[in-house]
Amino acid sequence: MSQRTVFAVLSIALVFLFAAGAGAQTRDETIVYAITSDVDTWDPPNSVQRTAIIFGYQVFNHLAERDLKTMKVGPALAVSWKALDDTTWEVKLRQGVKFHDGSPFTARDVKATFDRVLDPTKKMTARGNHAKVKLVEVVDDHTVRFRTDGPYPLFVERLTAQVMQSEKVMKDKGHDWMQEHPVGTGPYKLVKWTRKQEHLLVRNDDYWGPKPALKYVRIRIIPDVATQIAELVSGGVDIIKAVAPDQMDVIDKSGQARTSSSPILRTAFFQIDQAGRTGKSPFQDKRVRQAANLALDADGIIKHVLNGLGDRVATAVNPMAFGFDPSVKPYKQDLAKAKQLLAAAGYPNGFDFRIRTTIGTVEPGVAQTNEALIADLGKAGLRAQQSFIGESVPYISQVKEGKAGPMFNWSWGYYSIFDADAILYDVFTCGQVYSYYCNKQLDDLVHAGRSILDEKKRAEIYVKAQRLLFDDAAYLFKWGLRGVWGISNRLEYEGPRDEIDRMYLVKPRKS
Amino acid sequence: MKRFVGRQVVQLAIVIVGISILSFSILHVIGDPVVLFVQEGAPKEEHERFRKLLGLDQPVYVQYWRFASRAVQGDFGKSWYGDMPVLDLVMERMPPTIYLTFAGLAVALLIAFPLGTLAALRRHTIVDTFCTMVAVGGQAMPIFWLGIMLIIIFAVQLRLLPASGYGTWQHFLMPAFTLGAFLAPITMRLVRSGLIDVMSTEYIKTARAKGLGERMVVAKHAFRNACIPVITVLGLQFGQLLGGAVVTETVFAWPGVATLTVEAIRNQDFPVVQCAVVLLALIIVTVNFIVDLVVGLIDPRVRVGA
């Protein structure tokens, strides 16, 4: 190698080194958060992705936000709210709040935000969340009134799902610009987005609330979960989510990171085609459905297959949802009784049927728990053939089109609304796309529950609804899920129960 | 030559139209994209509203015609999820994949040529057996497994390389090796068999008879002809290499067009899938076209149109 070549090689190496070092934030001041797929937009109401909700929490604020300790909805950009009558809510706004561009946050921004979302000619996915809101009126700079289409008990819950955007930005910059440039009031600001690669956020030093402890957040897109774990245990990233139960040991024994698990607002169950959407089946007989529930040893599966990462529930209503009734006790395995019920229903030798299952995008260890569950059903004579669909779109299509009976694997995340209505209406009432159950009695209860504002009366209604679902063995009830996070030992953080990671709650760990 | 190029261009057009129709139909068969678009808990009317807004209420052939008539003008529409021009999105992700593919190709050649030549010249010796073992081993290793093994060794244990990501030359090493290892074995086998064939031909005997040294015989006379099948197959393998890039990109969090496409298929973001599929097909067809030309240059006997 000539001297000249050596020189050229060295200079190239130096350029690379400088390029790598330039503009780097110090690692101590930075949280590196890994996600499996990138958002497509920084305009949260224009996205269906869960990640977009999480991103929204870092850069924007909502009128109301949930306190992760009490799980109650409390003030954020709104300081108070009250129902003036059955169909009018008045919301008082926080004063002195500024958007990242320096303009003040006022009632006009709230109105503009909702008007934009509710416009039926626009492709805003959040519209479905607020379809009950008819009109938003500005009373004064810091007071807004919402008119709803009938009584709307979920109004306050829904406020936690809508980020506040700036009227000025909507007018001056427009929709397309907003897709890549979030202007919020939140604790962090977006500095740079390299698509499908990473996002860099910096602390908003003018933030109205408690300031984040760490100055920078880097959100990295790492599609492969095994790679995420490798990054976590080698110190490349700090927080990962959706760790599989069998991978927890790898993280906990690394000395570099630990796992944190927390119950989440998602309940898993097998839907049974009681309504006969897919056609006639033995499961339309209540005794057969009860037999299925009695065949299942759910506690055993949670303990041995899921490493304890599940919370047995009596119906599909999640313990964290408003209206949950702890007095209904879950079915316990009783094979003798199950066989008896099957015989009484006319199936003394049991029968064969099909169970549809899919990949576990949201349910950890689902392939293994499905095997265990099918084995349990077989013990009572309910001989299931598993029919597996490896992609979620065709699976969801079949479910929505009513072709997934007589039994299929499903779970429900309540679209983050902590209320029994958020599952009972969509998954149990007659004629809904996700519902394979139809019972006039239940429909009446659910409709009563969504048309009054009185919390006590609503709670009583949901207690009745849960007893009914339990006695009728509407579906094959399983458990509430738990999420597992992997967290670097240099940070103080806990997996949030609403699955919305908040980087502004992360603190350096005192050693 | 002109006739040859003309014929290739016509073929290219037919292939692209065929591919676009195929991917369009497959997307429509997989399921209803509105299923993913409407949030859980949204009223039923939202389904219809989105179907209209996305143009999915039209018959499939109308939808295809709309897509095709705009696409020929370079307008692939906007991503349903990101509201940005699809062409920008795909072009932005194209370079990382192309760099990775070429780096993988380079690694494959660096492994395949020396080992293949050695194996051919030292046929039926321990060297040949060793090379065969490498080939079989390399072919048997799935990409995702090799990728994760490399990460565990070089990032987690030795802490020498970043486990994943994109941006510096260190980030290139493991993905390029992973992808290269996938292509190297078949290339090596071809170099070996090609060289063995050539070495037994008459003109090699002639070269030797002229008194040329063995090194000269191999390098100047044998190699050029042994290369022909290798280049042809490499061209054909290019598509495979892009396929391998999907897995490699996923394992190493490489922000390329392969992962973009897979994700768009999962999301049923039709415009993104269409654009990516058409452009990737274009690349593969072009590469094969270039391969045909190169082979023609090397070997006058197959010079086309002549």
Image (spheres, coloured by chain):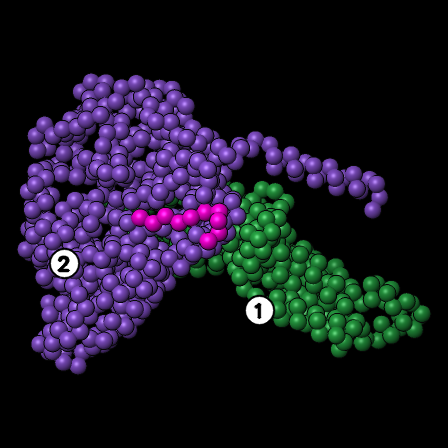
The label nearer to you, 1 versus 2, is 2
Q: Which chain is purple?
A: A
Q: Residue A497: x, y in percent?
A: 29, 44
On the image, numbered disc 2 is attached to which residue?
A: A329
A474 on left or right of A311 = left
Amino acid tagged 1: Ala
Q: Which chain does green denote in the image? A: B
Whether residue A260 is in magenta: the answer is yes
Question: Which stretch is magenta?
Answer: A253-262
Residue under pointer 1: B140
- Is residue B296 something that shows in the picture? yes
Q: State yes or no: residue B135 in magenta.
A: no
Identify whether B295 is placed above or below B268. Answer: below
Q: Amino acid at mark 2?
A: Lys
- SS for dot 1: helix
Q: CA distance from mark 1 to mark 2?
A: 53 Å
**Majority secondary structure of magenta residues:** strand
Looking at the image, residue B92 sits to the left or right of residue A340; the answer is right
Percent x, y for residue A398?
27, 61
- The quarter holding residue A404 reads bottom left
